[in-house]
Image (cartoon, grey):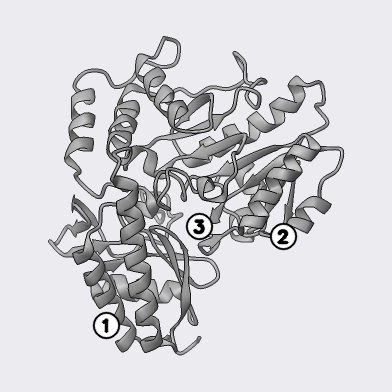
Amino acid sequence: MAITPLMPVYPRSGVRPVRGEGCYLIGERGERYLDFASGIAVNLLGHGHPHLTKAIQDQAATLIHVSNLYGSPQGEHLAQRLVDNTFADTVFFTNSGAEAVECAIKTVRRYHFADGEAHRHKIITFKNAFHGRTLGTISATDQEKMRGGFEPLLPGFEVVPFDDLAAAEAAIDDNTAGFLVEPIQGEGGVRPASQAFLQGLRRLADEHGLLLALDEVQCGYARTGTLFAHEQYGIVPDVMAVAKGIGGGFPLGACLATEEAAKGMVIGTHGSTYGGNPLAMAAGEAVLDVILEPAFMEQVRTTGDRLRQALEQMIPNHDALFEGVRGMGLMLGLKMKTDSRQFVANLRDNHGLLTVAAGDNVLRILPPLVIEQAHIDEFVGKLSEAARTYVPPADE
């Protein structure tokens, strides 16, 4: 048999973690890695956080799954906490970010259907976005590496340049239902939208009767120093998809919406067998317990500023490799003058440092939100040493 038991759709590295301790991963041979990838912005409390671990253990011993045929006191409680702390009036729980975005897309389209305007189905999205790997979410992007070989894709999306308000406005027509946008593009290169762009999308949505749907799967849940990134833009969405950090490592996502935006989502229009299961809800509750503590967001902002300053001070020493820092809070990107994927591999294999490559030759820096100064010092020290000794491949 030539194919591997695990379907070979990932170019897996030689790192094989079997245990995690705080901000570190430990491989099967005992090797330690400083984890500034966090499972791609998922493990926001690091590994083995005692409050999260206990919540999952206690719930696993009590009740894991019952389906959505029955009432959900666990889901109702977590949904109420999210409603109390966000713009939203209602929440649908999913198992992943892609599912959360799918629910957001359906919510936007169903809104206009409920108004008797089913022809308003087109959603305007943006170049280099990443919204997931389902047929619906790859149809919403223009990235060929995700779309190739899966045609025909779903109709009803128009992709325009990111952070270009004029292009977004020009794409609006009688069939337009809304916008779907990441406030900070993650996989696309850690590119924050400008204030004028996001505020402009909100204005256009209001003027044309459209819904503004945000994909905060990666930039949400305290990663930028506020509970959600859009808070720093002074806007309120109609619909928002979240996941990754919401469960601290346990599979969980959510679609949040205002009452008006969700008016078409009535009984029978959407569902999920596992979505909102009691075990996932326990993880979500534990994460909120920690990040809603008054000092937590300030800690993220402070450590984010310190990490950014340390990187900016380091760059002039290695200006043949690095161009600059972008991003917000602890969602940072280091723009490189060489192939970021090769450099990420070098950090991982030769320096015990885990990061994530992104588009536009950006090195994504996504540490647990609980890092301390010692972790920043270790990270920058290893990064600097790697830069000092790095020799780009000959074919670059």
Answer with mark 1 or mark 2, whichever residue precedes in sequence: 2
Query: Which residue type does callout 1 highlight?
Result: Glu
Residue 347 vs residue 309, the one in the foreground: 309
Q: Which marked residue is nearer to the observer: mark 1 or mark 2? A: 2
Cβ atoms under marks 3 and 1 closer than 8 Å: no
Q: Is residue 127 above or below residue 306?
A: above
Element at badge 1? helix
Residue 253 in the image: x percent, y percent?
A: 44, 35
Residue 149 vs residue 288, the one in the foreground: 288
Q: Name the residue under label 3.
A: 186
Query: Which residue type does callout 2 highlight?
Result: Asp
| Residue occupying image coordinates x 83% and y 53% | 170
Element at badge 3? loop
Answer with mark 3 or mark 1, whichever residue precedes in sequence: 3
| Residue occupying image coordinates x 38% and y 52% | 41
Q: In this view, does 316 lie above or below 102?
A: below
Q: How far apart are marks 3 and 1 (CA)?
A: 26 Å
Query: Which residue type does callout 3 highlight?
Result: Gly
Residue 385 is tagged as 1
| Crowd class of label 3 (few under 14; some 14 to 19; many from 20; radius 10 Å) | many
Q: How far apart are marks 3 and 2 (CA)?
A: 17 Å
Answer with mark 3 or mark 2, whichever residue precedes in sequence: 2
